[in-house]
Image (cartoon, helix red, strand yellow):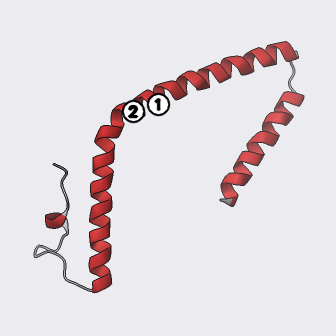
Amino acid sequence: MGYFRGLIHGMAIGTVAGLALAPQPGDRTRQQMKDAANGVRSGLEVTGHAVQRLAPVVVPVAQNAMHAVNLVRRRSDDDDVLASNGTAADTVHTPA
C-alpha cells in the first residue's frame, strides 16, 4: 500500500512541478491537458466495452480456478492424498 501511495504522490508532485516549469504559455498547456484527458476518456470507454465483452468468458474461468485452488487448499490442510493421478483435475467443477 505504501508503495502505491508514494507512486501517486510522486506523480502528483511531478505533474505540478512540470506545469510550473513548462516553457510554453498556459493556454497551450491547458489545451494539451484537455486533449490528453479526452484521449484517456476514450481509452477508458474502449477498455470498458472490452471488459463487458470478456466478462461472460472470464468470470466462469476465474470461478473454476478459485474452486480448484480451494480444493487443493482443503486437501493440503487435511493431509489427504490428491486424486489417483496426483492432480486435482478430476474434481474441478466445470460450469454447465
Residue 39 marker: none
**In the image, what residue occupies the spot 73% across and 21% down?**
33
Quick one: quadrant of the N terminus? bottom right
Residue at the spot x=22%, y=84% of the render? Answer: 80
Q: Is residue 63 above or below residue 78?
A: above
Q: Position of residue 83 (x, y in %)?
A: 14, 74
Rendered location of residue 9, percent (x, y): 77, 47
The kind of residue on which mark 1 rests is Gly
What residue lies at 63% left-to-right and 19% top-to-bottom? Answer: 38
The image shows residue 87, relative to residue 21, as above or below, that is below
For label 2, the residue is 52
Residue 18 at what x, y percent from top left? 83, 32
Quadrant of the rendered image containing residue 23: top right
Asked if labels 1 and 2 touch by Cβ distance under 8 angstroms, the answer is yes
In depth, the one of 86 and 72 nearer the eye is: 72
Corner quadrant of residue 84: bottom left
Q: Is 89 above or below relative to 85?
A: above
SS class of the residue under badge 2?
Answer: helix
Q: What residue type is labelled 2?
A: Gln
Q: Mark 1 points at which residue?
A: 48
The residues tagged by marks 2 and 1 sit, at their Cα atoms, a distance apart of 6 Å
Measured as percent of width and height from the top left, residue 61 is found at: 28, 49
5 displayed left or right of 55? right
Where 22 falls versus 3 (above or below)?
above
**SS at mark 1 in the image:** helix
Instruction: Please state if 53 lies on the left or on the right of 27 as rendered.
Output: left
